[in-house]
Image: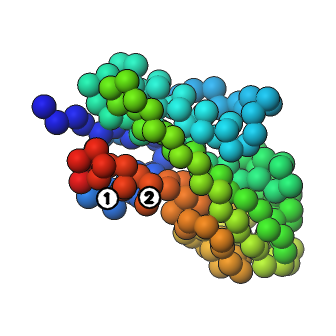
Amino acid sequence: MEKKLILASKSPRRKELLSLCNIPFETSNVEIDESFDDNLSLEDAIVDIAYNKAYAVFKDNKDSIVLGSDTIVAINDTILGKPKNEEDARRMLKLLSNNKHKVITGTVFLYDDKVIKNCNVSYVYFNELSDKEIDDYIKSKEPLDKAGAYAIQGLGGCFINKIEGDYYSIMGLTLNFVYKTLHSLQLK
């Protein structure tokens, strides 16, 4: 019997990205504690959260392959989560303005008794943003539900001078790693 693939995420972006692999999958919304273990590096902490997302689904679906992923934005090791409100988004965008920051995406596959983990670190360089650009962007509402207060695949992409790393990881799923792993598991 072929195993089904389950994406342990409620993110529409991750669902959209995984669909690019042209493999049937289901999604399972998962709620876990996403707080960071202060004893871990940011990279290890994000992989840990991805694992916890995957395991929350896997424990009731042991005959499946479960994919969990999580992404954070950090500048000078300060984590920029989803903004609490417009003022918080403004604060984050001012921090990102004319600066380099990193986007860390952890990805975990669970199947049978196996665990496959990956961590991708990409760097994003923002242009200098005027107060008007920040205000106009906040009025668009796009930054209000995004980690780091921007979407690279949306209007926020206009503020990016360059990236070093994986575009899809910045969006929330390390697509090349996912595709290669699914291929090695003969799901592709």
- Mark number for residue 109? none
The residue singled out by tag 2 in the image is 175
Q: Nearer the viewer, residue 26 or 41?
A: 41
- Decide: is 102 above or below 65: below
Amino acid, disc 1: Cys
The residue singled out by tag 1 in the image is 21
Residue 108 rendering spot, x and y as whole percentages:
48, 39
- Decide: is 137 above or below 110: below
Residue 129 rendering spot, x and y as whole percentages:
82, 76
Q: Quadrant of the N terminus?
A: top left
Q: Nearer the viewer, residue 26 or 141?
A: 26
Q: Are marks 1 and 2 in contact (CB under 8 Å)?
A: yes
Mark 1 or 2, nearer chain start:
1
Which secondary structure lies at badge 2? helix
Task: Tell whether 52 sits left or right of 100.
Answer: left
Q: What is the spatial separation of the Cα atoms under label 1 and label 2, in whole angstroms?
A: 8 Å
The part of the image, by quadrant, that contains residue 95 is bottom right
Which secondary structure lies at badge 1? loop
Q: Residue at x 50, y 54 (%)?
A: 173
Q: Residue at x 37, y 24 (%)?
A: 113
Q: Quadrant of the C terminus?
A: bottom left
- Residue density around tag 1, few if under 14, some if 14–19, many if 20 or more, within 10 Å: some
Q: Residue at x 37, y 55 (%)?
A: 180
Residue 160 rendering spot, x and y as whole percentages:
69, 76
Number of numbered markers: 2
- Decide: is 35 above or below 187: above
Task: Tell whether 162 sits left or right of 188.
Answer: right
